[in-house]
Amino acid sequence: MVRSKGYPEALENKLIDRVLYDSDRSPEFTKVVEEISRTIPHMCYQCGTCTASCPSAPRSTYRIRKFVRRVVMGLENEALTDPDLWLCTTCYSCTDRCPRDIAPTDVIMAMRNLAFKRDIIPVNFLKTVQAIYTTGHGVPNNDVNRAARKKLGLEADPPTTHKFPQYIKGIQKILDYYKLKANADRIVKEREG
Amino acid sequence: MENMHEYAFYLGCIAPNRYPGAEAAAIRTSEKLGVKLLPLEGASCCPAPGAFGSIDLNVWMAMAARNLVLAEKMKKDIALVCNGCYKSIWEVNHKLKHNDDLRDRVNEVLKEIDMEYKGTINVYHLAELLYNPEICGVEKIRGSITNPLTGTRIAVHYGCHLMKPRKDRDFSVDAVSKTEAPHWMEEMVEALGAEAVEYRNKMQCCGAGGGVRGYDIVHSLDITNEKLINLKEVGVDALTDICPFCQLQFDRGQIEIQEKFGVSYGLPVLHYCELLGLAQGMSPQELALDLHAINCEPFLAKVL
Ligand code: SF4
Ligand code: SF4
């Protein structure tokens, strides 16, 4: 039987009441998440509308409401090291419905940005970066598709960076400006050798 | 031809590189409807909002801004056919137009490649343009049909990033702004002569976004599978979408669901442009429907 990651065994453990120690809190974390996300998690009153709207919740231990709470409490380590951080599909249903006008999705995105600064990032995200660095496309063309395009009367390569590879330089400069390619290469190599 | 509305056609990745029939159909069908799609030379991936946004929102914005500048140089508004692209291209345009700090930050990077984002163009999804009576409208679509899809039951998958989050969107047509129980795509389907079918939890995500498809494929497919179960409950001949990434998730996803969960649906999944192409008399060959993972024949048998 195929399984998704860590469900249901991990759920009970995750939802258990715990003591909060001041030493685990980073008020700075709350501030930085608010800055990056440009939304207002501190307004959250924990109604749970977000989790109730979330397609990822019923099939995992991922609870968006809990992540919003962690931000408010400044529980940086707990939030950034939880693998559930990567189960948000960014469907924005929670954001559409939050009665406090918070954008929980953008709170997740901000935390993912912070996790990446600590090298916490699934490899598949980095492979998209690598593909775009070399071709300009996250999902590049291939021979089967080229043949099909020609039959349709389209050019074998679309008029993107595929047909005009001279534009790839500019893309590489943007990615290099943020040292994104170098970091992606380094992390992929560390993980996969 | 009278009054063609011209746009820079932003292609993205999955339409041109996996479902080229959707690209061909978009160009040919909209030309019959007074919308001319011009090539946007040198465009790249939007970039993928899930992957890039998660890594660094600043890179996401700078990369999307580069695509926007290409259209600014053409002095054309952008039209596109993918919700994921809409999220990147429309939303970054919107953010940069309204936030000086973000625009300055992006322009500092673009300076390195002799570009400057100015905020001179708008971005639209082609579906939204076709629905808009000021550009095209449902009646004009109906009038362009030579091969009505009569007798077929078709459900709509709206996807997420065109319309959500509602508070960060700004459509001129009111019907497109409704995110809980929208009906405008159903109107577009009925214009083709088909019966548009409602189903449980229609607005649920396909499961692919946010990098989840790559991170935990089983989790991602389980979300897709829930939608397929709901679709099976009402019985449809095809599912239509306005996002090639959703399309990939439903189309190839059904093969993966068969492998991993042991259930099969055989439900053809067509981009609205492909559907419109069929209804305007394009052949399955002209739409490269043979590239689809799920055989479209049972559906085609009803409409050809
Ligand atoms: S819906 Fe909004 S207010 Fe309610 S728990 Fe979620 S983030 Fe907090
Ligand atoms: S955006 Fe993310 S957290 Fe919000 S409902 Fe969708 S999957 Fe859940």
Image (tube, grey):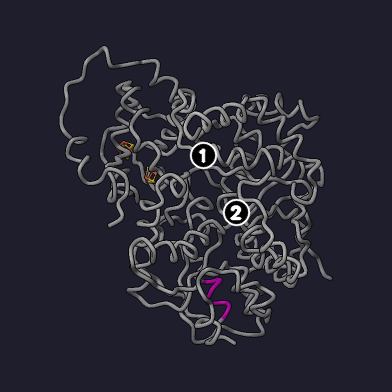
Tell me if residue B22 comes above or below residue B279 in the rendering.
Answer: above
- Amino acid type of the residue that numbered disc 1 sits on in the rendered structure: Phe
Q: Which residues are magenta?
A: B187-192
Instruction: Please tell me which residue is depicted at 77% across the width and 69% down the height of the picture.
Output: A153
Instruction: Please tell me which residue is depicted at 49% across the width and 70% down the height of the picture.
Output: B186
The residue labelled by disc 2 is B172
Q: Is residue A135 visible in this depiction of the protein?
A: yes
Q: Could you say whether the residue bearing mark 2 is in a helix, strand or loop?
A: loop
Letter of the chain that mark 1 sits on in the rendering: A
- Amino acid type of the residue that numbered disc 2 sits on in the rendered structure: Ser
> Ligand 2 appears in which quadrant?
top left
Q: Main secondary structure of the magenta part?
A: helix
Q: Quadrant of residue A135?
A: top right
Q: Position of residue A16 (x, y in %)?
A: 16, 33
As for residue A18 lying within the magenta part, the answer is no
Q: Position of residue A188 (x, y in %)?
A: 52, 33
The residue labelled by disc 1 is A125
